[in-house]
Image: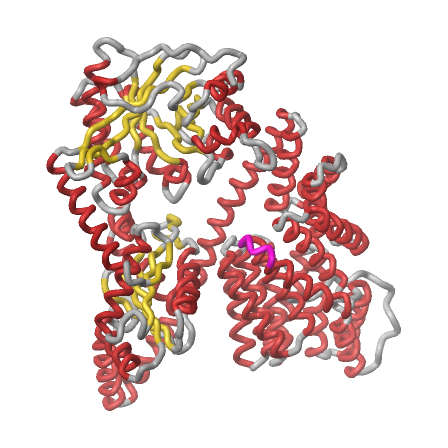
């Protein structure tokens, strides 16, 4: 990440002291000019300028020299001294009205505060710097502030927001023809692309920037670019080219003494060597890890130790691999905690700024009202007119105003698009935090939408958690979908509500005039239908098409049939044995719901569970499954007192405030102990937003948990130690890939590693989807505790169950 400011000065013997203020200005100009090409020379010149300006009592020259020296100390990581110099420069420049120097000094303050982890104060300084640049018309200062605010969001892992700021900075720098700022913003934008997985875009931008950096002698930028290019090439599966670029970055960074970029370059070099199966990879990664530890920068430590862990595991050094993996996991956990703290600080700073602005606005209005009664009357009339067209909570235009604007556009035959937006899981916010926090979220969503649309587009609140957008000048579905995608990304950054972090997702439907309707009602209806289609996947964009009406009708009919099925008791449970891998004996059964649909017969869960999970139907169905499984288990335990039954729990069901009590009531009704039922929850539900808080309520009652479908979602081994899970169920996809033949990659190393890590965490392992004897044999040899799959038995009704024991597969099974 490249900060827009300067390069480090280096101590040199003082030159002959100039005799006039013009000489101070010349020294400062020369120091500024070589800031990115010769760090030692720049520091020498700035130091001379400061000495002479102080002797001559030349305030403007002294303020500028202190600012340039501050950047020198910053690049040498001497942060307290750098901040002292920036504070002195800013105070002096403000006193004498040297606005350009003041702006750069405030920028330096912001960079130092962020580097020291004071993100709230840093954001405050960045915004102040931006205001100074706007007030003075200093577009270079504005570009610098946008670039550095982007860097702040990059640190917060909000890569979409970071990219938006960096691209704004880049566009402004290009417009100004400011080569240094173009290079800096380009490097940072390419880094955003890399973190977003857009490797081809990152590589193209880096290559274009590299040519300019080399031509202008920006050596530090050159080697930053080469390290970044290596990362992009690795992401594109081109390790040989990545190795060449990483090697150049290592040599150049060593020559410059840029230790942070050297660490990044070493990690890229190690990754490339590892991909090429070069034995030097270990030495390089060990050097990278040692340097990262010395620098103490957590994200570099996490990456270096993580790569080293993967290498050691591939070489069979399980102990070393586990040691580095645990270190990387601990660092990552600390980093995530720190990111959350920083986000909270930034949000607090932004809220504080909004409050200050709001108070200033209130004072302005009060003063205006006291000026004359006529002005007060005019403002009251304007307010009434505003309220008639705007939503009281969010300040957006309301439904009536939106429809009027859409009607004008349609009547004029102007090309427009309509987006219908519905927030996903908004009810959960209201139910968990209360309606006041729900209102806070709606206000934040409205502001994000307002910022994300183009000039001339309109955002409206339909009501509840629904919003609409009028896209002007949109001539195709593709163009409208691109705009919808930008809105979706703008909403996805986490928000903090009542001290808790929430991730906002939405479903967006798209309709375009005139293809999807020639009047207001039809366009809105069709955009709404497309949104309903997107709602099936959540966090998605869908365009309207002619078949959508029929599809939506089918879904509505199926949903109505499912609601009736609950009332008519059309659901039943089948059970599949979970068998001891070492003995072939039944240890537990998994309860699997089926639907006896009069028109279709016995319907498997894949046909109806996804629809139910998207509605409130999953909660009463889940409660019925728990009670029915407990009832049947009571019957079985008369002959098999140690038998247990596992029950799948949907994320929405788990998030219900009284869920733990529902489970306990089912156990109490049928006289079962808490260990009798095992609750299967997906890793996404547990490791996602507030998942750990939900499962902790269940664990407090002594109810055992199984982490289901492990390997298909978050797969956070580092957090497995902290979860109250008794079982880890490896997803069937990993079991089926055990025997994959080249060029496909076998999952055998992953499965073995998961078993090892789970046992280290004190968790038993269940392998799902075991269909062949040789899979059972291998899993048993690797220490897998339990297996489940067709090799043992298919799911069956209670009266049709086969209880085993099943014969173990022979050593020759194939």
The boundaries of the magenta stretch are 196-200
Q: Is residue 28 left or right of residue 494?
A: right
User: In percent of the image, x 79 and y 56: which residue is there?
Assistant: 256
User: In percent of the image, x 65 and y 41: which residue is there?
Assistant: 304
Q: Is residue 709 left or right of residue 149?
A: left
Instruction: Name the quadrant containing residue 291.
Output: top right
Provide the major secondary structure of the magenta segment. loop
Looking at the rendering, in which quadrant would you find the N terminus?
bottom right
Q: Position of residue 99 (x, y in %)?
A: 60, 78
Residue 451: in sight, yes or no?
no
Instruction: Name the quadrant containing residue 413.
Output: bottom left
- Compared with 328, 574 (above or below) is above
Between residue 68 and residue 495, name the one nearer to us.
495
Q: Is residue 359 left or right of residue 551?
A: right
Residue 618: in sight, yes or no?
yes
- Residue 498 falls within the magenta-colored stretch: no
Q: Position of residue 591 (x, y in %)?
A: 28, 26
Q: Tell how many labels.
A: 0
Between residue 750 and residue 434, name the one nearer to us.
750
- Compared with 526, 580 (above or below) is above
User: In percent of the image, x 64 and y 68: which residue is there?
Assistant: 88
Q: Position of residue 340 (x, y in %)?
A: 47, 49
Q: Is residue 220 left or right of residue 567?
A: right
Q: How is the image coloured?
A: secondary structure
Q: Position of residue 705 (x, y in %)?
A: 35, 27
């Amino acid at each position: 990440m490249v900060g827009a400011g300067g390069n480090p000065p280096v101590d040199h013997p003082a030159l002959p002291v100039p005799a006039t203020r013009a000489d101070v200005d010349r020294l400062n100009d020369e120091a500024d000019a070589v800031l990115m090409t010769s760090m030692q020379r720049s520091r020498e010149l700035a130091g001379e300028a400061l000495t002479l300006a102080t002797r001559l009592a030349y305030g403007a020259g002294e303020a500028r020299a202190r600012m340039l020296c501050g950047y020198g100390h910053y690049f040498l990581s001497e942060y307290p001294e750098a901040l002292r110099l920036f504070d002195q420069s800013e105070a002096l420049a403000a006193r004498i009205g040297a606005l350009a120097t003041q702006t750069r000094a405030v920028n330096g303050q912001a960079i130092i505060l962020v580097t020291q982890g004071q993100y709230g104060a840093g954001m405050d300084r960045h915004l102040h710097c931006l205001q100074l640049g706007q007030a003075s018309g200093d577009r270079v200062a504005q570009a610098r502030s946008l670039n550095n605010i982007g860097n702040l969001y990059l640190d917060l892992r909000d890569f979409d927001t970071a990219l938006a700021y960096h691209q704004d900075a880049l566009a402004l720098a290009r417009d100004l023809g400011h080569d240094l700022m173009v290079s800096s913003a380009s490097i940072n934008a390419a880094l955003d692309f890399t973190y977003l997985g857009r490797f081809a875009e990152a590589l193209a931008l880096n290559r274009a920037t590299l040519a300019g950096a080399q031509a202008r002698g920006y050596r530090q930028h050159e080697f930053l670019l080469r390290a970044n290019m290596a990362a992009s090439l690795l992401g594109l599966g081109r390790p040989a080219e990545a190795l060449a670029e990483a090697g150049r970055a290592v040599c150049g960074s060593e020559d410059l003494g840029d230790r942070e970029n050297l660490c990044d370059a070493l990690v890229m070099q190690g990754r490339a060597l590892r991909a090429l199966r070069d034995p030097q990879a270990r030495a390089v990664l060990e050097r990278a890890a040692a340097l990262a530890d010395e620098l103490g920068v957590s994200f570099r430590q996490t990456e270096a130790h993580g790569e080293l862990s993967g290498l050691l595991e591939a070489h069979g050094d399980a102990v070393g691999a586990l040691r580095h993996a645990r270190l990387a996991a601990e660092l990552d956990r600390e980093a995530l905690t720190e990111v959350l703290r920083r986000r909270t600080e930034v949000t607090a700073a932004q809220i504080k700024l909004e409050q200050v602005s709001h108070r200033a606005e209130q004072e302005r209005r009060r003063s205006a009202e006291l000026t004359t009664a006529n002005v007060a009357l005019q403002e009251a009339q304007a307010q009434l007119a505003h309220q008639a067209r705007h939503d009281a909570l969010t300040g957006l235009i309301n439904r009536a105003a939106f429809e009027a604007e859409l009607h004008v556009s349609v009547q004029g035959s102007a090309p427009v698009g309509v987006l219908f937006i519905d927030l996903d899981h908004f009810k959960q916010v209201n139910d968990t935090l209360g309606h006041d926090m729900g209102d806070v979220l709606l206000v934040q969503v409205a502001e994000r939408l307002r910022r994300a649309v183009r000039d001339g587009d309109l955002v409206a609140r339909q009501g509840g958690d629904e919003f609409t957008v009028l896209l002007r000048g949109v001539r195709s579905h593709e163009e409208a979908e691109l705009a919808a995608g930008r809105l979706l990304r703008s909403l996805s950054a986490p928000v903090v509500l009542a001290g808790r972090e929430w991730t906002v997702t939405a479903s967006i439907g798209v309709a375009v005039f005139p293809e999807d309707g020639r009047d207001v009602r039809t366009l809105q209806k069709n955009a709404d239908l497309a949104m309903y289609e997107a709602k099936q996947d959540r966090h998605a964009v869908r365009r309207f098409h002619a078949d959508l009406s029929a599809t939506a009708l089918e879904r509505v009919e199926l949903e109505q049939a499912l609601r009736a099925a609950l009332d008519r008791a059309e659901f039943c449970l089948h059970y599949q044995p979970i068998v001891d891998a070492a003995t072939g004996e039944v240890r537990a059964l998994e309860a699997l719901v089926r639907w006896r649909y009069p028109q279709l017969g016995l319907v498997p869960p894949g046909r109806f569970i996804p629809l139910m999970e998207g509605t409130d139907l999953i909660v009463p169905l889940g409660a019925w499954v728990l009670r029915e499984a407990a009832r049947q288990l009571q019957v079985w335990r008369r002959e098999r007192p140690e038998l247990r039954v596992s029950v799948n729990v949907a994320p929405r069901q788990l998030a219900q405030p009284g869920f733990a009590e529902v489970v306990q009531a089912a156990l109490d009704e049928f006289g079962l102990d808490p260990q009798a039922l095992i609750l299967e929850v997906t890793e996404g539900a547990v490791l996602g937003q507030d998942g750990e808080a939900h499962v902790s309520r269940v664990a407090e009652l002594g109810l055992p948990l199984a982490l289901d479908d492990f390997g298909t979602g978050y797969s956070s081994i580092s957090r497995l130690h902290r979860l109250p899970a008794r079982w880890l169920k490896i997803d069937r996809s990993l079991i089926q890939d055990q025997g994959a033949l080249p060029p496909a990659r076998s999952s055998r190393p992953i499965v073995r590693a998961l078993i090892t890590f789970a046992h280290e965490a004190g968790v038993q392992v269940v392998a799902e989807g075991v269909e062949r004897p040789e899979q059972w044999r291998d899993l048993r040899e690797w220490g897998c505790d339990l297996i489940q799959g067709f090799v043992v038995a298919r799911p069956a009704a209670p009266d049709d169950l086969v209880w085993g024991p099943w014969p173990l597969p022979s050593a020759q099974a194939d």
